[in-house]
Image: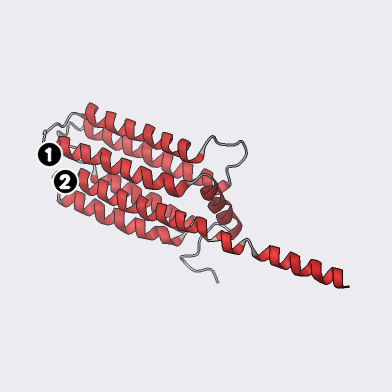
Amino acid sequence: MTSFWQELATPAQREQLARLARQRNWGLALLLIGWLHLLAFSLCHYLSISVEYHGSAGYLAIWVAELLGVALIFRICGGPRRPGETPSLARFLTRVWVAYFLLAFNLGTMNTLRGHHLFELFPAMASLASFAFLAMTFVIDRRFFAAVLVTFAAGLLMAAYHAHSYLVFALAWWAILKAIGLTLLSARREPTSTNNVPLHVSASSSRSSVEA
């Protein structure tokens, strides 16, 4: 009987995604992106609290620069992408997070159209992240539910302490990306012990064939 928490992806699809993550060094990339995000939104926090700057153009420039930095980090860590190496779950991940960024920028546009002096709709961006991680929980790995809880709590804190919402958002994403990155890096070391098993089996089978 299928449980509520059982992932929709097959084990073979999840293994393909894990292999791609190892090949393209996603663990290191996510660690670096976590620090980049912390730097970018700490700068936003500084501009909002210390400088009292609330112009949308300045924050938009920081966010666009961060996205360009994210693309550069993935390119440097993973190298050029080879044609035909993207499995279905990787395409699913791309679509989920492209949708997240489109909706996040849409929130900023609505905030400007409403004439808010501050980014009043910013806490809703954490809810968007919660939904994206919830999709990953049901499709890829149930452990992503921890990220759902972190972004859910971050959204509540951002709404309650709106003046420090940039800092809360920065720390929440830094913790999530660091945890995922370290998990992927530790998973890269595990296959080294399992890859030796077929060698022992083939060696024993060859000895038995020689003795026969």
Q: Residue furthest top?
A: 57
Residue designated by label 2? 164
Q: Which residue is mark 1?
A: 49
Which color scheme did the rendering employ for the protein?
Answer: secondary structure
Q: Picture quarter containing residue 194?
A: bottom right
Q: Quadrant of residue 153?
A: bottom left
Distance between the alpha carbons at the discs numbered 1 and 2? 8 Å
Residue 179 in the image: above or below residue 121: below
Q: Amino acid at mark 2?
A: His
Frontmost residue, 25 versus 97 = 25
The numbered mark, 1 or 2, whose residue comes first in the sequence reads 1
Crowd class of label 2 (few under 14; some 14 to 19; many from 20; radius 10 Å): some
Q: Is residue 47 left or right of residue 83?
A: left
- Corner quadrant of residue 107: top left
Residue 102, disc: none
Q: Is residue 177 left or right of residue 10?
A: left
Q: Which quadrant is home to the C terminus?
A: bottom right
Q: Residue at x 62, y 61 (%)?
A: 195
Q: Is residue 65 visible?
A: yes
Q: In what element is the residue under mark 2?
A: helix
